[in-house]
Image (cartoon, rainbow, N blue to C red):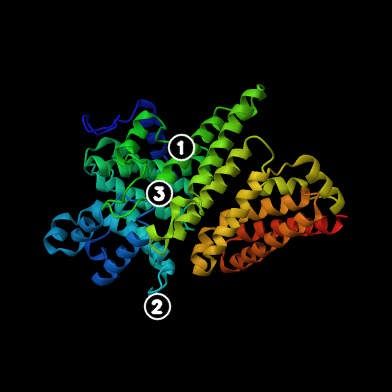
């Protein structure tokens, strides 16, 4: 059913509102928002007008396809036209500008014309702080769809930052969801905003094992029905390009929500193993179908339909797929991508450790395949710069652990040595990244992975 003849707002149900409010009550505890606001002189003080436009253009070129919920021309006009700027330079608009520029600066290393005379990461963090300070007062002002967009992009930027945690991003996202559900606006734009929120909500909820804010139900999917054409495609806001990545992420978000709900219901630990196996296998089949439909190599991702930076979005899809597969297995078997699992076994002689791995750990083939895909995808843009590799660090760390453990439990010597070489190539990258950071957490993780690497090397060499 399409939504042309009904009021295009989805009032939050009691349970959803309760979940949102519970998450919002943690704002002060998480310490991710400030109650102070920027002075007018601070707004866009550092970048001059042409640089603002350059960075905003970069945002729409490289990130706008991933979350296509901002109208480019109307947004730019509100910045550059004096009359509009005086009338519309409201707190939500300023917060949205800062959040979008923060994301764009993080993507700046992909631009061939990028001016590298400034520290893009520092500029990104400066704009994120400004977006958070502006965003801290959005909820207390009159709710507007632009405010929800501003908070959404702020949460996205937080997920790309090494300063903030994903749980802190969850708090900001909760505020965006509450506003988006309460306000009325352009029906198509509101659908895009809510579906963008749905994607990020599914990702963060699965990562943190918390109840999602937006339910995977007929009401939410009616928004998708509003955007899709008769062939199931979603067009960009100007209608010039098909946003297959957006459609793909929406469908992956639905799978992520199903996996999370299954985990939270405790089906993976139930004594009725038959029911668990059916549910688990169904999810694997759905993920396989999604994989074949949306990941690179599919006919849907023809290069001529997309800007040159499309590979960034391809990689994000691959990473999301790997993390989803990893989470799917974490509730049913020993977690093959968990450092704690490795630490529990890394004791005794090398022969004893290998035997312990082979008797107590299962490394599913599709998890290994997903790890290989993650390696290949990230390698395809590895030359783009340190910033992207740092963003991909958690995925690389998990994939490396999976690969080394797969080597230890492998009985085919040729396969084991091939996988060892593949994992080694990324272990060296991880070591280099550890040298670029100041935190002790990464360094200690690298040390554990190093021990796992030596065990994998021993296992491969000891095979006959």
For mark 1, give the secondary structure: helix
* Residue displayed at 71% across by 62% down: 421
> With respect to residue 262, does 189 lie above or below?
below
Q: Whole-percent x and y of residue 268?
A: 62, 30
> With respect to residue 309, does 364 lie above or below?
above
Q: Nearer the viewer, residue 298 or 86?
A: 298
Residues tagged 2 and 1 counted as in contact (Cβ below 8 A) = no
Number of numbered discs present? 3
- Disc 1 designates what residue? 254
Do we see residue 272 in this rendering?
A: yes
Closer to the chain start, of discs 3 and 1, is 3
Q: Whole-percent x and y of residue 212?
A: 44, 36
For mark 3, give the secondary structure: helix
Marks 2/3: CA–CA distance:
35 Å
In the displayed structure image, the side of residue 454 where residue 138 appears, left or right: left
Closer to the chain start, of discs 2 and 1, is 2
Crowdedness of circle 2 by 10 Å Cα count: few (<14), some, many (20+)? few
In the image as oriented, which residue stretches furthest toward the top? 272
Q: Whole-percent x and y of residue 336?
A: 68, 45
Quadrant including the C terminus: bottom right
In the displayed structure image, the side of residue 117 where residue 265 appears, left or right: right
Marks 2/1: CA–CA distance:
42 Å
Q: Nearer the viewer, residue 326 or 218?
A: 218
Write down the quadrant of residue 329 in the picture: top right
Question: Which label sits on residue 244?
Answer: 3
Q: Nearer the viewer, mark 2 or mark 3?
A: 3
Write down the quadrant of residue 37 in the picture: bottom left
- Disc 2 designates what residue? 117
* Residue displayed at 26% across by 42% down: 188
Question: Which label sits on residue 43?
Answer: none
Crowdedness of circle 1 by 10 Å Cα count: few (<14), some, many (20+)? some
């Amino acid at each position: 059913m399409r939504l042309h003849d009904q009021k295009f707002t989805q009032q939050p149900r009691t349970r959803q509102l309760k979940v949102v409010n519970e998450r919002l009550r943690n704002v002060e505890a998480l310490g991710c928002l400030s109650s102070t606001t920027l002075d007018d002189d601070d707004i866009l003080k550092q970048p001059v007008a042409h640089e603002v436009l350059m960075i905003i253009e970069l945002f729409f070129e490289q990130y706008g396809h991933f979350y296509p919920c901002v109208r480019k021309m109307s947004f730019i006009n509100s910045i550059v036209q004096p009359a509009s700027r005086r009338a519309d330079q409201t707190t939500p608009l300023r917060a949205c500008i800062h959040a979008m520029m923060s994301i764009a600066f993080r993507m700046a290393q992909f631009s061939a014309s990028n001016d590298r005379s400034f520290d893009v990461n520092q500029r990104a963090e400066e704009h994120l702080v400004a977006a958070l300070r502006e965003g801290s007062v959005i909820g207390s002002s009159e709710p507007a769809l632009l405010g929800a967009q501003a908070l959404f992009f702020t949460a996205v930027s937080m997920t790309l930052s090494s300063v903030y945690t994903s749980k802190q991003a969850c708090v900001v996202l909760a505020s965006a969801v509450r506003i988006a559900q309460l306000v009325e606006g352009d029906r198509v734009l509101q659908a895009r905003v809510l579906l963008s929120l749905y994607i990020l909500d599914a990702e963060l909820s699965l990562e943190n094992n918390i109840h999602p804010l937006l339910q995977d139900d007929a009401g939410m999917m009616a928004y998708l029905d509003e955007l899709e054409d008769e062939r199931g495609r979603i067009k960009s806001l100007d209608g010039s390009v098909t946003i297959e990545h957006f459609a793909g992420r929406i469908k992956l978000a639905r799978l992520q929500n199903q996996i999370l709900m299954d985990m939270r219901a405790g089906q993976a630990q139930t004594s009725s193993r038959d029911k668990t196996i059916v549910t688990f296998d169904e999810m694997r089949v759905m993920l396989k179908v999604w994989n074949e439909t949306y990941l690179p190599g599919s006919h849907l991702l023809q290069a001529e339909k997309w800007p040159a930076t499309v590979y960034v979005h391809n990689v994000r899809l691959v990473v999301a797929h790997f993390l989803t597969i990893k989470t799917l297995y974490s509730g049913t078997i020993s977690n093959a991508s968990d450092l704690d699992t490795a630490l529990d076994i890394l004791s005794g002689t090398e022969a004893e450790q290998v035997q312990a791995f082979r008797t107590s750990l299962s490394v599913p083939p599709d998890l290994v395949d997903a790890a290989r895909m993650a390696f290949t995808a990230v390698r395809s843009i590895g030359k783009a710069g340190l910033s992207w590799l740092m963003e991909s660090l958690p995925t690389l760390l998990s994939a490396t652990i999976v690969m080394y453990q797969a080597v230890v439990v492998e009985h085919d010597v040729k396969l084991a040595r091939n996988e060892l070489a593949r994992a080694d190539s990324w272990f060296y990258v991880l070591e280099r990244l550890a040298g670029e950071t100041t935190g002790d957490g990464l360094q200690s993780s690298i040390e554990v992975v190093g021990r796992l690497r030596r065990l994998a090397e021993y296992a491969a060499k000891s095979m006959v």
